[in-house]
Image (tube, coloured by chain):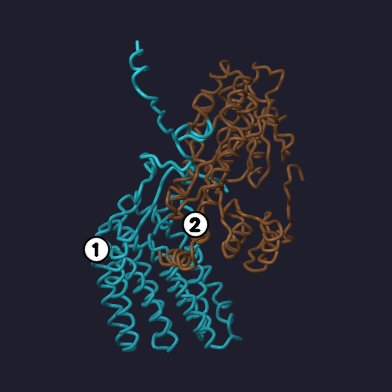
Amino acid sequence: MDHHLASDSPQVRPRWRKVAYGGMQPGFDDNHTDESFLEGMVMNANVVRRDMLKVMLDSVSISEYLCIVALVVLVWTYTLESTIDENRLLCIDVSLLVLGFLILLFTQEKISLSILVHHYFLNISFFIMGLYVLAPIYQTLTRSISSDSIWALTVSLLVIHLFLHDYSESTVNAPGALKNPALTSCISVNASVVASVFIASRLPSRLHVFAIMLFSLQVFLFGPLVTYCIKKYSFRLHLCFSISLMVVTLSFVYMLHCLLFVLLLSLLVFVNVVCPYWLIRIQEYKFEINGPWDEAKLCFAITD
Amino acid sequence: MTGGLKVYYVPWRPFVMQNSFLTLFPSLPIIRTTLIRERITIVHGHQAFSTLCHEALMHSRTMGYRVVFTDHSLYGFSDAGSIHMNKVLQFTLADVSQAICVSPTSRENTVLWSGLPPEKIYVIPNAVDTAMFKPAVVQPSRSEIVIVVISRLVYRKGADLLVEVIPDVCRLHPNVRFIVGGDGPKRVWLEEMREKHSLQDRVEMLGVVPHAQVRSVLISGHIFLNSSLTEAFCIAILEAASCGLLTVSTRVGGVPEVLPDDMIILAEPDPGDTVLAIERAISMLPKVDPQVMHHRMRELYNWHDVAKRTEIVYDRTLKCPNQNLLVRVSRYILNIIC
């Protein structure tokens, strides 16, 4: 059937195959580069195209948390200077608690009053009682340490807390959700609690200590939950809340000290404006290569 | 040693997992003495993770010798360890005359991270000693199907995948038995899996198998299972095929290029898909003749062929012009900039 083909045409060399067996392929060198070279390569497959406005809006939650921490430090400073006395502090605590509960009730539609009472209220009352009982221990904890070391330690711990804080709020959830917190978010929570304990130990009376500990732990432990609920409920509400918080913080810090006001303002501008612009500028240089040589990713959870 | 092979021992003490510490210049006297005394013409380094290889190549290039480098692994581009390794290798390979990779996928990977032109990289696969890995004279009975796994039990070699796959296969096929050889950090998980599903009589754990006894373990089975997550070239598969076992493997790296399609069944690195592939292998088993497979392996892989191809690379290396210092330094600087 193909006699004339076999007699006329010269020897057609077989196509190069991308295989390792069979020895040297006849007619081809070992360094032969075929057209199919690198055809399995995929570039920038997982890169997210970012929009400037969206990044700026997302960075608002970071500056919101910075303002919350600044407010806490403000309250600490006023308490240490005895500008706020313990009764006022207790009023602040109670009002913050009530406010937090109201926001939770308002923003979580599925939650009813009974669940609120059973789950949150009971736990928080146990927590407050425990704190009151332990207050004498905190008061005498750092008596032998000099004040300078305490201030230095507190500042470093707060910086660590801000650096390692989980701003994506992946671990904050309504009760019942199971998620393993990352190591860094555990470290950041611990750093903030230890900083609060150090500050509380510098105060004169037990009631002072109890009030300031309650205030700090309320903000550090429940603050992320409240802001997450607000953000989930309505983005506009979250934006209004953050901007008003920033304005309030800046005005209080201005009343305290001018230099700190300038520092805080420049930090907020840096986080909200400069960083998004920088991120989008350097995204152009991103070069991600994927291909058949990558290590396979197992899609099931590995219990390790 | 046989064939005029000489081995020089460098007395560095290994400090963790058989790795010795990096020494930049203390290895220079030993390497220089060896190269001059033996009147070496070409220096051939293997394996990117070996510090001795990098230092030997660097010192040989300083002394003006021709250098060939063979790469046996694949590298990703995304995690910190890979990025560091790639940078180190870029410097070493900036100055090498030729490079050899063990599979076409490995060659693509090397071109991407080293920046060498593709013409400088040759594909010379490893081979298998078919005289040593012969199938059994008397085949084990096919009434009970035996699946053999011999690998280091670490994450990279897919030990977690094994933990998921073995119970499913044992449940679906009551006549299947597993033999698991090898040791490693993940051995505990396999033992735990064995206890949890009461598979003590169906999964046999052999521990470390010395290389001389690998053949006797292989010929007691019908199917070889390889579950690695990354492989440039898998010699274990060749040894299994040479002993007449049908191979089931994950489709990663260079594995699809190693054996023809009728001797290997590929699966995605997913437990469900691997179980399906094992079922396909079990159904294909009656058509498989170990002696025929062994003879085919003799044709496909041959160390003499590898030696001939490597000699061609050496000839090309010797013909390479020796570049002057400025050109070589500029190539290093290009690596620092990019």
Q: Name the one closer to the observer, A133 or B55.
A: B55
Q: Which residue is mark 1?
A: A52
Q: In the picture shown, does residue B108 fall above or below A11?
A: below
Residue under the image location 30 percent in, 87 percent down? A255
Instruction: Using a 10 Å C-alpha cutoff, classify the residue at mark 2 as few (fewer than 14 neighbours), some (14 to 19) or many (20 or more).
Output: few
Chain A's shade in the image? cyan
Q: In the picture shown, does residue B154 fall above or below A196?
A: above
- Figure quadrant of the C terminus of chain B: bottom left
Q: Name the one closer to the observer, A3 or B261.
A: A3
Q: Which chain is brown?
A: B
Chain to which the residue tagged by mark 1 belongs: A
Label 1 sits on what residue type? Met
Q: Nearer the viewer, mark 2 or mark 1?
A: 2
Respond whether the residues carrying marks 2 and 1 are from the same subunit.
no
Q: In the picture shown, does residue B66 fall above or below B293?
A: below
Q: Quadrant of residue A3?
A: top left
Q: Name the one closer to the observer, A146 or B248.
A: B248
Residue under the image location 41 percent in, 84 percent down? A77
Q: Which residue is mark 2?
A: B321
Is residue A235 among the parts visible in the rendering? yes
